Image (tube, coloured by chain):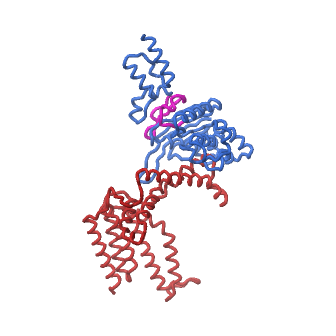
Chain colours: A red, B blue
Amino acid sequence: MLRDITLGQYYQTDSVLHRLDPRVKLAGTLLYIISLFFFRNFIGYLIAAAFLAVVIKLSRVPFKFMVKGMKAILFLLLITVVFNLFLTPGEPLLSVWKLTVTKEGLGTAVTMAVRLVMLVIGSSVMTLTTTPNNLTDGMEKGMRPLKVFKVPVHEVAMMMSIALRFIPILLEETDKIMKAQIARGADFESGNLIRRAKALVPLLVPLFISAFRRANDLAMAMEARCYRGGEGRTKMKPLIYQKRDRVAYLCILFYLVGSICVGRLLL
Amino acid sequence: MSLILDHVNYIYGEDTPLAVKALDDICLTIPDGQFVGVIGHTGSGKSTLMQHLNGLVKASSGHIYFNGEDIYDRDFDMKKLRSRVGLVFQYPEHQLFEIDVFSDVCFGPKNLGLSKREAELRAYDALRKVGLPDELFYQSPFELSGGQKRRVAIAGVLAMKPDVLILDEPTAGLDPKGRDEILHQIKNLQAETGMTILLVSHSMEDVAEYVERIIVMNKGSVMYDDIPKQVFSHYKELEEVGLAAPQVTYILHELKKRGLDVDINATTIEEAADTVEKALKVSC
């Protein structure tokens, strides 16, 4: 039933990208996304696409997994394209009934669609090659400078990794309770909206109770192992930049400068 | 009233790279009124098999017949099947949700479309059957002890008056006393009502004393299906798949090897004590 939902989609394999320090990947993704918004001509997008293609090749993740992520934003993509296509004022190209497609509209719609698609694929490369734990570790270390401004970096990172860890557990729990209530004759699928909402009570109450119970157990287990926040806490596998990370930073920088120069200044 | 499984296969995550064969060509007949123990290591497919019996999980291939009707027939009434085949899940106390014990037990019968009066009668009856003291009926189910909660949850399924009762690890997480009490009550229930009971467990000790037939599951298929004495005689093979025969089986085998003439087929502690006593009297 609910097991089909894939969240925190990590694709297990061994590649350069998988071994890369998560901070590099985070920074790289961010810079890549920023670069997408700088281009003024299509050559920039071509360079970005080529860069993305190389990265995907390096990641050894089958391309169809990236496309899967596109399904989620299909609706958003459609709205963006349609609105830009019909609602941008400018030189009319084609007119059907009350709707007019303008030359500017066509331009913006295509640019927006390309940007969106490349943005989603780019960030899914990061999530596909980085385990959620690694990702939060990277965020924690990468955002450490924010501590100066009293941002509780460690606490936020810990909360994130716990939340991510709990998603599959709670999904499984939901599945189990649902089955147990169906076995007692509960009906989650028929009836009008009010009846269906009411039918959720036997599912939600036990689910909440179990979530609280698990949170309690976890808190107890953490305290029993002397967890008291990030102060003075060391890591078993601390993040240390390797040679390949420096090379990756250089590549990203090179891409950033090159693509923005070409995509913005040329022509 | 019988359950027949005919070449049932089930594959988890079919059509994905992570497909796992959870059930492999299961053929079983469970006649009326039998008390069956289903034993298997974690991940042997026993829980999955049980969920097939009331249609919660649909087999990838094969057929299941309940009273001669194929439950995968298009016009078969699944809801009716679920009222006839009661399934008590592992840790069933986690599904309690009502404000008091009594209304929680009423949930099942009410879903069957029974009148309020009839549902309450059944709930009362079921709670008596699991031996919950009357004064707890109107307490919140969350204030009860672990063992009491579990009884309430079992009563919740019993109140639907099923012909077949499946209990998935009903003693998991209980102390030895709570475990014995629950198992005794299940045995009494079976004697009183003559319902078919399937008791799922990973502990031989649990079932040896109570059941008349044991089905041993291993890696999704049926390894042994026989009366307890016969199954335990394979104790060496059982060990290889991570299961163990009751402790008395080991003691008796060892005694026999050391030259004491005991009956190695004894499965309960009482039987074992008898045979050891007898053997000692002869040798003295």
Q: Is residue B153 above or below residue A152?
A: above
Q: Residue at x 67, y 57 (%)?
A: A195
A23 left or right of B92 in image: left
Q: Is residue B197 above or below residue B95?
A: above
Q: Is residue B278 above or below residue A239?
A: above
**B66 or A158, nearer to the observer:** A158
Looking at the image, how many numbered discs can be counted on the residues?
0
Q: Residue at x 53, y 43 (%)?
A: B90
Q: Is residue A112 above or below residue B83?
A: below
Q: Does the stretch in magenta take in B205? A: yes
Q: Does the stretch in magenta take in B281? A: no
Residue B141 picture location, percent across and down? 62, 46
Q: Is residue B223 visible?
A: yes
Q: Residue at x 49, y 33 (%)?
A: B215
A112 left or right of A47 in image: right
Q: Residue furthest bottom?
A: A91
**B88 or A220, nearer to the observer:** A220
Residue B73 picture location, percent across and down? 59, 46
Residue B145 picture quarter? top right
Q: Is residue B85 visible?
A: no
Q: Quadrant of the C terminus of chain A?
A: bottom left
**A97 or A81, nearer to the observer:** A81
Residue B169 picture location, percent across and down? 52, 39
Q: Which residues are magenta?
A: B199-226
Residue B49 picture location, percent across and down? 51, 41
**A214 or A234, nearer to the observer:** A234
